[in-house]
Image (tube, helix red, strand yellow):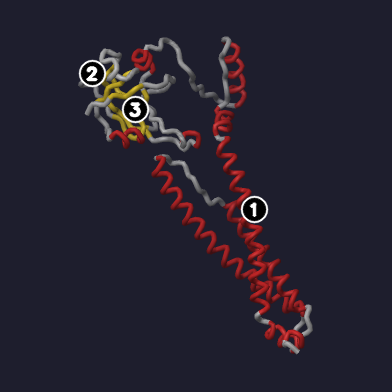
Amino acid sequence: MRLTLILVSLIALVAIPCSAQSARPDSASGNRTITIDERLAAEAGLKLGDRVVLAAEPRAGDPNAAADTVVIAAITRRGADPSEIARGEFRVRLHLDHLQTLAGYGDRVDRFAVSTTGPEATARALERIEASAFGFQAHRSRDIAVETSATFAVVTRFHRAIGVITIVASAIFLLCILLLKVDERRRDVAALRLMGISRNTVVGTVVLEATLVAALGSALGMAIGWVMSVLVNVYYQGVYRTPLKFAVVTPDIVLFSVALSLILGAVAGYLAALRLVRMPPLALLGR
């Protein structure tokens, strides 16, 4: 199978990374090998061992443009990088000398990555790289990740605002429901009061019942949230072909949700019960 791939950028990359799914050299044919990502393999219908043509310019406009026939030796998986989700570009990895020869770019690169052994080594490397020549700019990978994830930070704050509004609205709705339910038990409360049951006992009973209902609702909510997160991840990971998790149910979220649910349930039950016990028993019976 022959396919022409156009090189649109020049970045210093290692040809066959260790994270590749599998590799198979083609020493018999003498062709050089490349690595492609799984998105390109899926879109173009490529597989290991296929021959493709690499070119720096579209060959339709210039049949004599520099090109090279290569063999696909590995297919790599994409990392869980949020900054790459919205990009529709494909990735082809070559040996550096191969890339320079094919693109005619010379001994130059647009950017390169350096691995250091710790924070102190990183700081020294930044200083030496920036001082080596005018125009050199060195950045920590962490800073680049924060900068490229700014959109996701805005989305996170937006979701947090929606969550706060939803919690406040649900708390008001819960209080109204409890008021209606407790008000339907006016005769039961009146009978308990006439039997000599104290106000505190009645209030405690209603609060306990409301707390149990809140606990059951929390368990049901956690189950629904977990199922929805699985469905969201399965769908969007298939759409974008990435291992990135789009929805995560963490222990912190679970603890916060359960604690908030129990507190709101207990407070709503207390307010609803307090409204009834303040009324005389005969008034509750309609007399």
Percent across and percent down for residue 56 are: 34, 18
Asked if residue 161 lies left or right of residue 285, the reply is: left
- Give, as a three-letter code, the residue at label 2: Gly
At 67% across and 67% down in the image, what residue appears? 175
Percent across and percent down for residue 24 are: 27, 29
How crowded pointer 3 is (Cα within 10 Å; few <14, some 14-19, many 20+) is rated as many
The alpha-carbon separation of the residues under discs 2 and 1 comes to: 63 Å
Marks 2 and 3 in Cβ contact (< 8 Å): no
Residue holding disc 2:
30
Q: Is mark 1 on a helix, strand or loop?
A: helix
Asked if residue 197 lies left or right of residue 236, the reply is: right
- Give, as a three-letter code, the residue at label 3: Thr
Mark 1 / mark 3, whichever is N-terminal: 3
Q: Can residue 247 be seen in this view?
A: yes
Q: Quadrant of the N terminus?
A: top left
Kindly report which numbered mark, 1 or 3, lies closer to the viewer in this rendering.
1
Residue holding disc 1:
164
Residue placed most toward the observer, 204 or 162 = 162
- Give, as a three-letter code, the residue at label 1: Val
Mark 2 / mark 1, whichever is N-terminal: 2
Kindly report which numbered mark, 2 or 1, lies closer to the viewer in this rendering.
1
Asked if residue 42 lies left or right of residue 123, the reply is: left
Residue holding disc 3:
35
